[in-house]
Each structure stands twice: as C-alpha cells, then as structure tokens.
Amino acid sequence: MATETMSGRLNSDAARREAVARRDARFDGAFVFGVRSTRIYCLPSCPARRPQPDRIVFFDGPETAERNGFRACRRCHPRQSAGGANHVAEHVARLCREIDRAMNDRPEERITLATLAVRSGIGASQLERIFRKHLSVTPRQYVDARRLRELKSRLRNGASVTEALYDAGYGSSSRLYERAPAQLGMTPRAYRRGGENMEIRYTVTPCPLGLVLVAATERGISALYLGDSKRKLESELRREFPRATISEDRKELSRWVGAIVEHLRGKQPKLDLPLDLQATAFERRVWEELRKIPYGTTRTYTEIARAIGKPRAVRAVARACAMNPASVVIPCHRVVRSDGQLAGYRWGLDRKLALLEKEKATKGERATR
C-alpha cells in the first residue's frame, strides 16, 4: 500500500526540517527538535518562533533529547504530547490488525466505518480524522487496499477470477469489475495473466534517491521504482509481471537510464521518454495531466480532477497517482493535498520531499542565471 505512517521514524533531516518549518502536527510523536542556544526541545508543531536552521538538532524522542541535556518546552509540552501521539498511533495500529484479522477470518463480512467506530469506542468522524492523520487514508481506503492486495495475491498464485474475487471478499463479480480495474490498471482476467507474452528488460542503478529500477519493453518504459534494495526492487517487478519474460539488460536501457539519473540530479529538467503501460482510460487521462505539471511546481488532487473534467473524482485521482508504475517519468510526486501538505507516496514521503526540493532549487538556480 502506497502510504506512510506519519508517526513512524523519518530517515531524512530535510524531511524533519520541512515538518518543523510547516509546524506539521502530523509528525508530533515521530521526533522532537532541540534548540542549541536555549537547550530546549519542542514538538514539530510548537507555536514558538523558529530558530535559525543551524541551531536546530533532531532527536527521536524526549528521552534522547533529555539525555543530551535539553529540557522540555513549556508551550508545547513535548513529553506529554509526544506520548499521546504515540498512544494514538498504537491505537490505529491495533485497529489495522483487527481489520486484517477480520478480513482473514470472515472475508465476506462488510467492514464499515460505523462498525470500526463501535469496536474502537471512538466516534466515526473522529476515527476517520485519526486514520487520515496517521495513515493518510480513510478506514474504507485501508480496507479496499487490503482487499485488493488479497485479490492480487490470489490471482498471481493461479486462482480463477471467480475464486479470487470471493476469497478476497468481493460480494459479486460486478462489484469487482466496477472497482478493481481502476486499481489494477487492467481487468482482473488480464492481471491474472501477469504480463504473459511480454518481454521486459530492466536494470538497477544508483541515483540521488538510493537506487532506481527502470524496466521497459521495446515500446517504452513499463516501470520505474525507487528504493534501497536491488533485491526488493526486482521482487516488486516480478510480482507485478509474474508471467512476463524478464531479463536484466543495462546496455539496452543505458540511454533512458542516463536521462533519468541526470533528471534526478537536477541536470535535465525536461524528461520526455516513451511509455508502455497497462492502464485504464481514466488512469491514462490522469497520468497525461501529471506530465503537464511544470518542473518545480505542484498541483493539488482537486486541480487535477478539474483539469480532466472530473471535479468530483478527487479520490479516484489519488488512487491513479498511487497506482502510477513509472514514477518520476509520470511525476505524481508533484501532486499535493489542498492544504499544501504532502500526501502518501509509494516510495516514501522523504523521497517525495527530496524530489520537490531538488526541483525547486534547480528552478531557482536557472531563474537567477
């Protein structure tokens, strides 16, 4: 699932610095920051005036800050608030485990927001806000993603479409064919074939964001993944195309890969490469609109929905962004929430932030020349 828990540990000081600058309360409980000159530590959302960046130091939590000689801020009360945020995050994690168990034991049972609210003892609207804050998805979207993951697993393992749809908890074939194509990028029957008769070449190479896997057919790029482990990236590719003929071939892809790496370094802002993607008509419309977003700028999900003539399809636009198999070439990282905050990104929010910061910096450098 293309989401990242906000209370999880952030791996990048740049991401933490951005959260502090924005006073982003979603990251309360994920870390605290200390001010060297005052020896006080605060939550990212603390209302106090921000010090110069070189005076800020980050800690994983209040205990670490205090071991280094910092004391808690009296305005944001980081020890109390961070503990509360962690408690809420743990509560959300328990609910997710309950959902997983329920879907394993009774896949046919319909899990509603009202049902979850009763189980958790939290009001439905408050529960939905908590999920959005900590997972960047609603409870229903979490259930849908969990059910889709089960469907994909069963189809990849050779189950018939009929068996897979009922075992995954879809109540009817019409419901499956109504919702799954927009998430699978094709019909369930086509997905079951797993790239049959396709010949895919790929290579994995270092880039400013770790590693990048580029996979392509003779017609164009079919996948572009970002990560830290070559083995995991290769497994992801084979999981998506289990019946395709897949081979590693750096030489044939070198020109495209070179352009992508230069783009990630900020040396080649315009990236216009051929694509060979399996997708629904709606996804293609969304992805085409994403490729129109100028380098160094962002658009909101609402703006994309309006641009394709579907102003009410904001959630469907978000799903299409999440299903984008060719990140960077299709710049879904340039889409943000209406409040300007970063939403979930398949390859991690720290990478999304790094991409946006690099593009912004490169655009600024070019403007001053």
Image: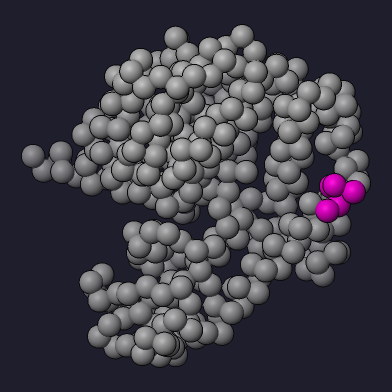
**Left of 178 or right of it: where is 18?**
left
Name the residue nearer the viewer: 115 or 55. Answer: 55
Percent across and percent down for residue 332 are 46, 36
Percent across and percent down for residue 139 are 72, 52
Q: Is residue 316 above or below residue 337?
A: above
Q: Residue at x 15, y 43 (%)?
A: 365
Question: Is the stretch drawn in magenta largely helix, strand or loop?
Answer: helix
Q: Residue at x 66, y 63 (%)?
A: 130
Name the residue nearer the viewer: 184 or 228. Answer: 228
Q: Is residue 226 above or below residue 17?
A: above
Residue 1 makes an appearance in the image: yes
Percent across and percent down for residue 358 are 28, 45
Residue 192 drawn in magenta: no
Residue 45 makes an appearance in the image: no
Residue 104 drawn in magenta: yes
Q: What count of labels does the image hold?
A: 0
Where does the C terminus fall, quadrant-wise? top left
Where does the N terminus fall, quadrant-wise? top right
Q: Residue at x 53, y 39 (%)?
A: 232
The magenta stretch spans which residues?
Answer: 101-105
